[in-house]
Amino acid sequence: MNLAYDVVVVGGGHAGTEAAAAAARLGARTLLITPDLSRIGEMSCNPAIGGVAKGVVAREVDALGGVMGRATDAARIQFRMLNRSKGPAVWGPRAQCDRRLYPAAVRRILDELGSLDLFQEMVADLLVDGGRVVGVRTRGGIEVCAASVVVTTGTFLRGRIHVGGDTGVDAGRAGEAPSVELAEGLEGLGLEVARFKTGTPPRVDGRTVDYARLERQDGDAHPARFASYVQEVIPEQRPCWITWAGEDLKNVVRENLGRSALYGGSISGRGPRYCPSIEDKVVRFPEAPRHQVFLEPEGLHTSELYVNGLSTSLPADVQLAFLRTLPGMEEVWMTKVGYAIEYDYFPPHQLRHTLELKEVPGLFFAGQINGTTGYEEAAGQGLVAGANAALRAKREPPFVLERDQAYIGVLIDDLVTRGVDEPYRLFTSRAEFRLLLRQDNTPRRLGPLAAARGLLTPEQAEVLEERLKEEDRVKAWFEETAISPESADPVLRVAGSSPIQEPTRAVELLRRPGITGEALARAGKMPEGGSLDGVLAAVEVDLKYEGYVERERERARHLRDQHDFKLPEGVPYREFVTLSFESREKLEKVRPESLAQAGRIPGVSPADLQNLMMEVRKWRRERSA
């Protein structure tokens, strides 16, 4: 049985589903191969999407036509906008999801794509011809030829699960076999490979929790949506709960550190510093009196709770013991044991910005295989890799997002330019253009780009056009409408702002502290438009911060000027003696595509950049002569 497709995607997690969907939307004949079709879109850790920066990525994936936003809305059982007390540049939408509803929604959305096929099998090797990947071979011997292959294997490459200080169990995740043959095949291509680890906390039976002793955390009264193009039916909402890990828990952990896989020496891979295990918290932060723990519902039709904040690789008996030290959980029953998982990844400096391997044409990587962690980071990479795999098959120009266009662009540029020494996660602090890259403006920021490159379905493109027209109408109303003192002063008094003496344009009032667009729209009797979600909020932020936004755009234009200075593939960096030795080494390793990318490499100084421009121009002249 031999098959032929334009694009083959290996893996059905968050990176794989977005990669397959993007390729299919672009019209490429696409095959997604995964070991278990019933676990497509599985939320193997916390059933939650979004957060600070991560929520912006989820909305960007949606604006580019992706799956994640719709699936989140269809499965979410709580929504909160994080950082609302701060400026809009760092707001982060977050949704707690039903663990079963989310993958069901992902599968339903994939089934809408006519040029996408799904197949259940384990990929064992790549087909290579003349150094170029031309397909895959499954464990059962089926060969699938393709112009492009996207590998999104998550934690499956030589994955090993650890609970306690034993040698561990080979597994890609709990209950599933690892991918060993494919890991060996990838390493056999001459690629650099390394090990990382991540982990998950125990789950508990909510019926054994004393909620009267916990702090209740409800979702927002007026939640927003993640999806801009399709409005899914949102399920009932559920609260989360907060408790605290105190001295009693720390004592249990300290007494058993030697039984931890991490501290007992069973694990060699490095874990994420921003999401440490409870063992790491106790060892690294001994002065902290307590650590916050969130109890988050796993779904509408289960009493199971995810214990967020207690990731661990301690033995099961120790996990149950420390759980029962938490206020409200003295009689708790543990339903699932937390564990650490160690796996192969391929340092991402080996990738282009398209996520294609520099040394292996036709092969793309996305997700944890690139040293990242997180559903949202995986989804963003998957969409870019899948789109470029399809465009390569169609012999069309690549699709690359810049740092001033999307958090996804920041993510990929960080990976390709700086590499990773621990599992990478996005933060707002990683982006130099935060005010441009907000969660509210993703449709206007990325929708037209997606439509122009064919990443939107006709239905999505139609909704986008309607939304942008509505935003233009609302913006024009604020700029052109004068509101009388009689109508405006009640709104101004509530906000503690001084009254006006004559009719004043709504946009001028909007820029006053504490004045909301919604209040002015009511006071000025703005004509009702469509019911598109988030239009008023997006326009309000753009107008309130117009001066700051324009300054940030000017900085972005300067960066684009540097980006236009291209660095060809064959540049002999080691021969440029006017550059520092460190700079030459780093440039040779990363081989940046532009001067702007070179400037973001640690160790490359501004003086090196100036000399690099001179050296490259000289080298070009000599080659031309």
Image: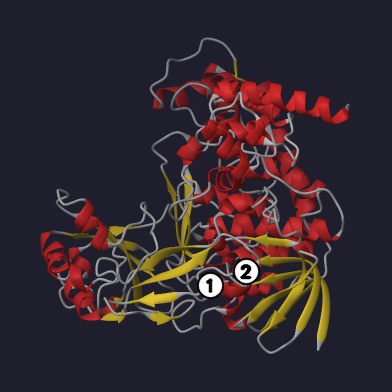
Query: For the N terminus, which image quadrant?
Result: bottom right
Position of 283 relative to 47 (above/below): above
Q: Earlier in the sequence, mark 2 or mark 1?
A: 1
Q: Quadrant of residue 611?
A: top right
Left or right, 483 with respect to 82, comes to right
Give the colour scheme shown. secondary structure
Q: Nearer the viewer, mark 2 or mark 1?
A: 2
Q: Position of residue 273 (x, y in %)?
A: 36, 52
Q: Which mark is residue 186?
A: 2
Quarter holding the C terminus is top right
The residue positioned 66% from the left and 32% from the top of the image is 575
Kindly indicate whether the residue at mark 1 contacts the one at mark 2 (C-beta within 8 angstroms): yes
Q: Point out residue 348 in the picture as x, y percentages from the top left corner.
A: 57, 53
Q: Which mark is residue 157?
A: 1
Q: Is residue 568 left or right of residue 586?
A: right
Label 2 secondary element: helix
